[in-house]
């Protein structure tokens, strides 16, 4: 079993999260703009519609896991695996079918956290672009809210209204990271419970941080394609492999 030494502690692989709450909002954005944002990785965005990619904003409350308790915010893009070949230029149904066959994954573009141990572990083990930020999560009320501040500037203030209950299903995706010039693939599995989904349902206010300007250039704030809240989920992250 692989192990990593982080701040004097051994972290065994795979890294397990026993409980976390997750809130996400996904947006259709221009594929050319999204490609420009992630051009540094060598990856290509997945087009769920011709000329349209998916950018998701997520905030997570990790309450029990191998990397301790912490808060996290993520800007992620749906991407095609490097071996998938040229992107399809067909209609919605054909495009979605092709994405399922090719195994689209999620590229983590920005990943602030509020604790130092998970910061070092995430960067060292997987090459996730974790950095310290102020993350204020308010999950006790029916409306779920996250406020992210970095370098004394507000990045984003995000409010999600939970939708209708849907069955939670275990799944597996490849996550992708990029740090210090290296793009990596990370096997990621999850088992959610207490899932609620709805079209729209998110309110986003952007600040004056460079990441906020980048989101603005993608067309945010706008109506979300879909939002989801997960009351409890377990997760597992395997060893990263450089591409």
Image: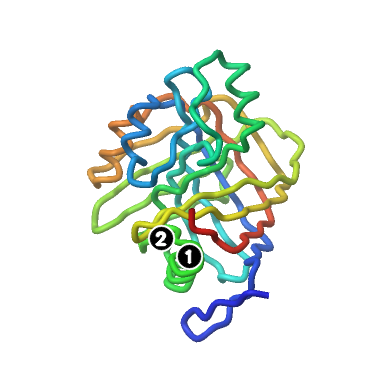
What residue do we see at 49% from left, 59% from top? 71
Residue 150 in the image: state x and y as whole percent.
29, 56
Rendering quarter of residue 36: top left
Q: For the residue carrying disc 2, how many other residues have a C-alpha within 10 Å: few (<14), some (14-19), or many (20+)?
A: many
Question: In this view of the protein, which residue sits in the foreground, 128 or 26?
Answer: 128
Q: Is residue 48 left or right of residue 166?
A: left
Is label 2 in contact with label 1 (beta carbons under 8 Å)? Answer: yes
Q: Is residue 211 left or right of residue 59?
A: left
C-alpha separation, residue under disc 2 versus residue under disc 1:
6 Å
Vertical order, 21 against 91 (above or below): below
What residue do we see at 73% from left, 34% from top? 166
Residue 47 in the image: state x and y as whole percent.
49, 26
Circle nearer the N terminus (2, 1): 1
What kind of element bears circle 2? strand
Question: In this view of the protein, which residue sits in the foreground, 243 or 132?
Answer: 243
Residue 73 in the image: state x and y as whole percent.
45, 51
Check disc 1 and report the residue beneath it.
122
Circle number at residue 130: 2
């Amino acid at each position: 079993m692989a192990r990593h030494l982080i701040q004097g502690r051994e972290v065994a692989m795979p890294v397990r999260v026993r409980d976390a709450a997750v809130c996400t909002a996904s947006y259709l954005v221009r594929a050319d703009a999204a490609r420009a944002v992630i051009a540094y990785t060598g990856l290509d965005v997945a087009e769920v519609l011709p000329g349209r990619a998916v950018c998701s904003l997520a905030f997570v409350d990790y309450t029990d896991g191998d990397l301790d308790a912490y808060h996290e915010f993520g800007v992620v893009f749906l991407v095609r695996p490097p071996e998938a070949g040229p992107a399809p230029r067909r209609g919605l149904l054909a495009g979605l079918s092709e994405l399922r066959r090719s195994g689209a994954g999620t590229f983590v573009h920005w990943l602030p956290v509020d604790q130092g141990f998970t910061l070092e572990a995430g960067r060292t083990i997987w090459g996730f672009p974790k950095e310290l930020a102020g993350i204020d999560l308010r999950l006790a009320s029916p409306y779920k809210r996250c406020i992210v501040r970095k370098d004394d500037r507000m990045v984003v203030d995000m409010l999600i209204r939970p939708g209708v209950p849907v069955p939670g299903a275990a799944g597996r995706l490849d996550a992708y990271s990029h740090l210090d010039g290296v793009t990596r693939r990370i096997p990621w599995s999850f088992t959610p419970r207490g899932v609620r989904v709805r079209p729209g349902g998110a309110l986003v206010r952007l600040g004056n941080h460079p990441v906020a300007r980048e989101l603005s250039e993608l067309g945010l704030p706008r109506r979300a394609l879909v939002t989801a809240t997960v009351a409890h989920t377990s997760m597992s992250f395997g060893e990263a492999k450089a591409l």
